[in-house]
Amino acid sequence: MLELLIPSLLQTLYMVFFSTLFSLVLGFPMGILLVITEKGSIWEKPTLYRLLDGIINILRSFPFLILMILLFPLSRLIVGKTIGTTATIVPLSIAAAPFVARVIESSLKEVDRGVIELGHSIGASVPQIIFKILIPEAMPSLIMGVTLTVINLIGYSAMAGAIGGGGLGDLAIRYGLYRFQTDVMVAAVIIIVLLVQGIQYAGNKLASKISKK
């Protein structure tokens, strides 16, 4: 069984790591823009805010499996194929990006408005307020948001197994559902649960440590 589980676990970790990285690259700037461009904020741009808000809401409305199928052409364009572990990273990243944007927006909005206004009053530029006030002040909440994103992506990667995405989800479907090897499916589920628990624990500890500092 280990010969089945270990490669599938490595595939899941590979998918989740890179899709987390790319979804943060896409979603983090969107989350920041949502905060700073809304009405009454430090860089008020209502049109840009409405555009970003609409795009994020539309992307979040798509069920992941449908979005993955719709993004097959993009996967083929970027990696040259539509199925497999590497190809799955493309839809995973795009599916998680709007979630990341909302998480970042929520975390940054928790920062005390008085601190932001103080920075603004002493002449801090918009980039300085973002990188020296907003992000450092919101860091514990941001870490919890990234933790939620990773856990979300583990779930997405498991669903991607239904259409040839590889990883533990694919293993559970191929052996547990189609070949009736319940022990393999149970083992895959246990590993996913342990993975989620470990990531949640690490995220909580890191956020708590930074919060104390």
Image (cartoon, grey):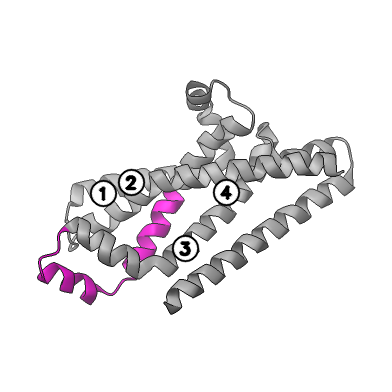
Label 2: which residue? 54
Determine the residue located farthest toward the bottom in the rendered image. 212
Q: In this view, does 168 lie to the left or right of 48?
A: right
Residue type, numbered disc 1 = Arg
Circle 2 SS class: helix
Residue beneath the point at 78% across and 56% down:
190
Vertical arrangement, residue 150 with respect to residue 132, above or below = above
- The answer to which of marks 3 and 4 sits earlier in the sequence is 3
Q: Distance between the residues labelled 1 and 2?
A: 6 Å
Q: Is residue 3 magenta?
A: no
Which is nearer the eye, 152 or 119? 119
Is residue 182 visible in the rendered image? The answer is yes
Circle 1 SS class: helix
- The answer to which of marks 4 and 2 sits earlier in the sequence is 2
Q: Magenta residues?
A: 98-125
Local packing at callout 3 (Cα closer than 10 Å; few below 14, some 14-19, many 20+) is: many
Q: How far apart are marks 3 and 4 (CA)?
A: 15 Å
Label 1: which residue? 50
Q: Distance between the residues labelled 2 and 3?
A: 25 Å
Q: In which quarter of the image is the N terminus?
A: top right
Residue 127's label in the rendered image is: none
Label 4: which residue? 153
Residue type, numbered disc 2 = Gly
CB-based contact (under 8 Å), mark 1 and mark 2 = yes
Residue beneath the point at 71% across and 45% down:
9
Q: Looking at the image, how many numbered discs can be counted on the residues?
A: 4
Circle 4 SS class: helix
CB-based contact (under 8 Å), mark 3 and mark 1 = no
Q: Quadrant of the C terminus?
A: bottom left
Residue type, numbered disc 3 = Ile
